[in-house]
Amino acid sequence: MPTLTPPDGSGLAVIPAGRYGVQVNIGTALAPIWVFVNGLTNFEPKFDPKLEDDSDITSDGWESQAVAGNAFSIDFEGLVKGVDEGSTFTADPGMQFLVAASQETGSDAHVHLRYWRTDELDEAFELHAAVKASLKGGKPNELQKFSGNLTGRGKPKSITKPGANLALHYGFGATAYTATVDGQTTASILTSATTAQIKAALELLSTVDTATVTGAAPDFSVTLAPIPTTTSAAGTGGTVSFAAA
């Protein structure tokens, strides 16, 4: 009988690790204010099943393990980044929030956060966690770093990858336009295009996974995932704007 062999994997693609967007809620549960945690160099979410021996006298001496529970945690490291104004340095507010929470007790030491893969992998979670975070020591010729751990408080919730809410507006006389998302520009789109046609044009861009378009000319609401860093538009015959709502 022929031996079963695995397929040749030389033609399979690979993807980089660590492509995550991470946000922490600095508002309230009812009125969340999501800010990014910037400067991360390593972000490792992991589940940790709790095993318990469930063997008995019929197991003939063989150990058997059952999953009796689970835990979730995230190890992270990063560079302290921020705005340098010469005499003052304002550190990234997301990083500051984690470090500040780690200096508290009780509910003040718990954080509400969400994270998602910014590539094609389908991974996006929202959770509450206890946080340990601190600035790391170092030499004067080294960059300032921070690191810590997030320990989940219960099961993380699977979510849809967050998208950016944008307003697309046509000025008087505009007949067509192009939209640019993180350096990638669409083909020309007529101002008579339907929401489905605008969606299709945006989703052809390599910087856009999904686009949701609602409304009617000259004002549309557009949600993009992953969240873009920059967006713009150029119109023919009139002005067109494509920016945060």
Image (cartoon, rainbow, N blue to C red):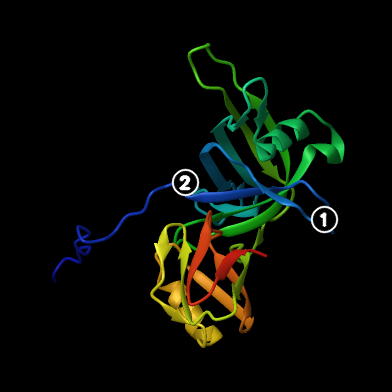
Disc 1 residue type (three-letter): Ala
The residue sitting at 45% across, 73% down in the picture is 203
Q: Which quarter of the image is occupied by the C terminus? A: bottom right
Disc 2 residue type (three-letter): Gly
Q: Which residue is mark 1?
A: 29
Which SS class for mark 1? loop
Q: Determine whether, in the image, residue 101 is placed left or right of residue 218.
A: right
Quarter-of-image position of residue 106: top right
Q: Determine whether, in the image, residue 211 is placed left or right of residue 128.
A: left
- Of 7 and 203, nearer the camera is 203
Tell me, for residue 13, which label it has, or none. Answer: none
The residue sitting at 60% across, 21% down in the picture is 136
Q: Which residue is mark 2?
A: 18
- The residue most toward the top is 140
Q: Note whether 89 is above or below 199 in the view shown.
A: above
Q: Which quarter of the image is occupied by the N terminus? A: bottom left
Q: Please report whichever mark, 1 or 2, sits nearer to the chain's N-terminal start.
A: 2
Q: Position of residue 164 (x, y in %)?
A: 61, 63
Q: Position of residue 68 (x, y in %)?
A: 66, 53
Res 41 seen here:
yes
Which SS class for mark 2? loop
Q: Position of residue 35 (x, y in %)?
A: 68, 48
Q: Position of residue 169 (x, y in %)?
A: 61, 74
Quarter-of-image position of residue 144: top right
Q: Determine whether, in the image, residue 129 is placed left or right of residue 48.
A: right
The residue sitting at 73% across, 37% down in the picture is 97
The residue sitting at 58% across, 38% down in the picture is 75
- Mark 1 residue crowding within 10 angstroms, few (<14) / some (14–19) / many (20+): few
Q: Note whether 18 is above or below 31 in the view shown.
A: above
